[in-house]
Each structure stands twice: as C-alpha cells, then as structure tokens.
Image: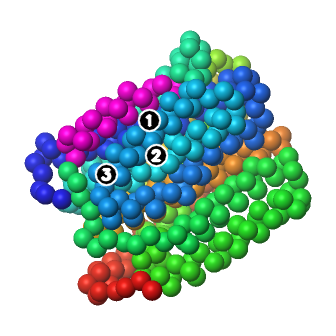
C-alpha cells in the first residue's frame, strides 16, 4: 500500500468505520425488534435465537476465510464485494414473507458481513503503521460500536413503533451504497506480499464445529438434552474441535494459525473477546425481553432506557484506545472486567418492580465495561503480528467476537426457554469475571515474553520459502 497523507488516512479510517457501523447497527436495531418479530411472525424463543445466530454463525464461520482471501486477492476488492452482499441481504430481509425466509436472508447478510470488519481492520492496520497512531485509530473504530449502541435502540424503537420491523433493514441501504461509492474512490488496493492458499478442510471443520454446537444449545430445551439429535450435535462438535488443531498444525498455511496462540496475550485476547461478546450478545437478547415483556415498555421506551449504557460505551471506547496507546492493554481490561462483573451482579437482583436508578446504574457499568474492552482486544490481536498476516490475525479476533455473540444468545436463550432468566444474568456475570481474570494473567511480563518469542518465530518463518503439500 502506498504511503498516504494524514488526511487520506483519516478518510480511509472513516470509510472502514462505516462498515462496522453497518454491522453493529444491524445487531442493536434487531434486538429491539425481537418482541415485535415474536408477535408478528409467531416465533418461539428458539426462533428468535435463530434470527440472531443465523447471522453470527455464518459470520463467525467465514471471517477467517474472508481475511485470508482479502490478503491474497486484494482487500479493497473483497471489501467492495462484502458491501454489495450485505446491502442486498438487508433488502431481502426487509421483504421476507416469514420466519424461515428471514433467517435465510440473514445468512446472505452474514456472508457479506464476513467480508467487511476483518478486511476493514486489515486495511486500517496497514494504513496506520505507527503503534500509537494505530491504537488511537482502533479506539475510534471501537467508538463506532458505541455509536451503534446509542443510535440502534433509539432508531430501532422509533422505526418499529411507527413503520414496523421491516424498516430496520432499510437503514442499511443508503449507508451501504455510500460506503461502496467512497471505497471505490478513496481506498487504495492492497494485498499481502505472500499470498495464502485456501484451506477447505479447515474451513469445513470450523463450520461443522460452530454449527453443530450452536444448534445443540438452541434446540436442546425443546428436543431434550439427552435426545439422540442433541447428543449427536455435541458429539460432532467435540470431534471437530479435537481434529481441527491437529489438522491445522500439519499445514504450512492453515486457516487458523496455531502459532499465533503461542503468544499468551493473543490467546488471552481471543478468549476475552469470546467472553465479552458472549456477555454483550446475551445482554442485548435478554435485556430487550426484560424491558418489553417484564416491565411492559414500548420498543422506543426500551431504546431510551438503554441510552445510559450506549453513551458510556461511546465515551469509553476512544478513551480505551488512548489508554492502550499510552499504557498498554492491562488497565482498560481490568476496568472493563470489573465493570461488567458488577453490572451482571446488579441485574441478578433486578425484577419488574426494581427502581429505575438501580437499572440505570447497571447500564452505566455495562456500557463502561464494554466500551473499554474492545480496543485492547483488537490491538493485542494485530500488534505483534507481521503486517502480511494482519488479515488473518484480525479475522481470528473478529471470529472470536462473533463466536462469543452466538454462544451468548444460544446459552442465555436456552436459559430463558427453560424458564430461568436469572441464570442468564449469572452467566453474564461470569463472562465479566472471565475478562477480569484473563486481563490480569495475560498482560504481565511473562505474557509479554511469549508474545515477543512468537513474533520472532513468525518473522523467521516468513523469510523461509515453504510449499504446501
């Protein structure tokens, strides 16, 4: 990629953030519409889970393939294809005649979405090469999630009440078309110096693992946890999980780089991403049902109630990027874990009669925690890796987020289907505690040493010509 002026780099950052806004806004708007979808489409709890997880599952399954493909054939080209598919999928979702069609069209959206965020992060990583400037850019990137959390519930609530749930997908059309136009004009093409080969077996194992595990969790309450179908799903998932790392270690250019996980900060960031986004996915799913079903709020009022959380996320995300650039990832991770844990604990004691003040306190804590956690995850994932592998590293981090969201919706939705919403809040509390503990373990001197050795080994391997058998 040629050296760009400061103004051009900021423009590239803005265009890439637009793609994140598309994906993030879609999720937050959709969660507000869940009660309306449940009523109009006569959907069960598992049907609502599939509306969310059909998207996140396909997204998680294809993110790494999209990242490595973009590094190989061109990041701009893949990014543009993703914008076209996501925008088309959004249009189809708005026209869906029933629940099954909506779930199917959500997968079209997801195929496009898989080409957006990891590729955009790879473009940002290769545009902002100075570490402190990159950390700040990633902080801005994280702030977009805050914008989507602020705008999504309010916009979604207003649209659902005034026009109907189909209108929530219309928002993506002008944003997607604008991003496509700006990408064609202003983002330069780039690709990795050493193209990576496709890993179809690894890709199939990832899809099988995520699909069978999520299906088993979502359908378990209805089918029975000991039914042959559910036990078969978990057996297939366990088998795929056992085979995947063994197979990938044998390849010189694997879909998932096992060598990355020799770095404790990278491995820790991956698990932290799963925990944090499981908390977010489960929180959004459970919270909107709580506000509209238990407290009897309208969709718009539910969006207004969530505003304190969204504002704190918006404020804390760029602050986290600056903290990472100035002091490293440890402080924001510890603060994030503590805040998310405290928020989960508060929600375990809330019911329909709880005071608004206590509810808003829990929202402020969750928004603070989630706003702080994103920048250290992303920065840790891409900072220690060679620039030629930035797409793969960013895709693994993005995949971890989507896997976490899928699991959060699946597991907490299963708890709701079993009639135990309080268990869902305890799961969210446990996710926050995981962020706190792992943030402590993976940011010390010993962990930094493993990262340095991993980077040195990857740089050394990159200079040795290899062929894939």
Disc 2, SS: helix
- Give how far across and how far down residue 411 sits, in percent: 71, 50
- Give how far across and how far down residue 15 sits, in percent: 28, 40
- Give how far across and how far down residue 9 sits, in percent: 18, 47
Counting residues from the N terminus, which is met first, the one under dot 1 or under dot 2? 1
For residue 77, the mark is: 3
Magenta portion: prevailing SS class: helix
Q: Is residue 206 above or below residue 60?
A: below
**Residue 346, visible in the rendered structure:** no
Mark 1: few, some, or many residues within 10 Å (few <14, many ≥20)? many
Residue placed at 77% from the left, 62% from the top?
Answer: 233
Residue placed at 71% from the left, 19% from the top?
Answer: 296
Disc 3, SS: helix
From the image, which quarter does the N terminus lie in?
A: bottom left
Q: Locate residue 317: give its quadrant.
A: top left
Mark 3: few, some, or many residues within 10 Å (few <14, many ≥20)? some
Residue 175 within the magenta-colored segment of the rendering: yes
Residues at discs 1 and 2 in contact (Cβ within 8 Å): yes
Q: Which residue is mark 2?
A: 112
- Give how far across and how far down residue 65 sits, in percent: 46, 62
Tell me the colour scheme of the image: rainbow
Residues under labels 1 and 2: Cα distance?
A: 8 Å
Write down the region rendered in magenta: 168-187
For residue 87, the mark is: 1
Give the left or right position of residue 90, taking residue 80 as reference: right
């Amino acid at each position: 990629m040629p050296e760009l002026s400061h103004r051009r780099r900021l423009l590239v950052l803005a265009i890439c953030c637009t793609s994140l806004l598309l994906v993030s806004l879609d999720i937050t708007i959709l969660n507000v519409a869940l009660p309306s979808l449940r009523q109009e489409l006569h959907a069960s709890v598992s049907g609502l889970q599939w509306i969310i997880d059909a998207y996140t599952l396909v997204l998680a399954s294809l993110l790494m393939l999209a990242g490595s493909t973009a590094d190989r054939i061109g990041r701009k080209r893949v990014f543009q294809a993703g914008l076209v598919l996501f925008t088309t999928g959004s249009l189809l979702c708005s026209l869906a005649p029933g629940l099954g069609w909506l779930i199917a069209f959500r997968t079209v959206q997801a195929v496009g979405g898989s080409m957006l965020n990891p590729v955009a992060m790879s473009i940002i990583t290769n545009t902002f090469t100075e570490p402190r400037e990159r950390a700040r850019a990633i902080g801005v990137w994280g702030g977009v999630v805050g914008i989507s959390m602020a705008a999504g519930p309010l916009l979604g609530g207003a649209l659902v009440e005034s026009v109907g749930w189909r209108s929530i997908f219309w928002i993506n059309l002008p944003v997607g078309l604008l991003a496509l136009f700006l990408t064609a004009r202003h983002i330069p093409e780039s690709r990795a110096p050493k193209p990576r080969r496709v890993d179809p077996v690894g890709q199939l194992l990832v899809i099988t693992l995520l699909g069978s595990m999520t299906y088993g969790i979502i359908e378990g309450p209805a089918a029975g946890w000991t039914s042959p179908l559910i036990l078969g799903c978990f057996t297939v998932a366990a088998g795929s999980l056992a085979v995947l790392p063994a197979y990938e270690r044998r390849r010189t250019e694997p879909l998932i780089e096992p060598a990355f996980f020799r770095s404790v900060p990278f491995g820790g960031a991956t698990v932290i991403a799963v925990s944090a986004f499981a908390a977010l996915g489960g929180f959004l799913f459970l919270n909107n049902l709580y506000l509209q079903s238990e407290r009897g709020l309208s969709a718009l009022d539910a969006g207004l109630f969530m505003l304190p959380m969204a504002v704190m996320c918006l404020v804390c995300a760029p602050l986290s990027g600056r903290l990472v650039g100035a002091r490293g990832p440890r402080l924001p991770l510890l603060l994030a874990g503590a805040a998310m844990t405290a928020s989960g604990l508060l929600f375990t004691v809330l019911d329909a009669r709880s005071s608004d003040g206590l509810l808003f306190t829990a929202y402020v804590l969750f928004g603070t925690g989630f706003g702080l956690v994103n920048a250290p995850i992303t920065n840790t994932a891409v900072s220690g890796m060679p620039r030629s592998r930035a797409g793969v590293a960013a895709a693994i981090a993005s995949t971890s987020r989507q896997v976490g969201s899928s699991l959060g919706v699946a597991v907490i939705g299963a708890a709701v289907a079993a009639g135990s919403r309080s268990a869902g809040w305890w799961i969210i509390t446990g996710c926050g505690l995981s962020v706190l503990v792992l943030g402590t373990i993976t940011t010390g001197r010993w962990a930094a040493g493993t990262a340095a050795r991993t980077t040195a080994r990857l740089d050394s391997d990159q200079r040795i010509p290899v062929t894939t058998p």
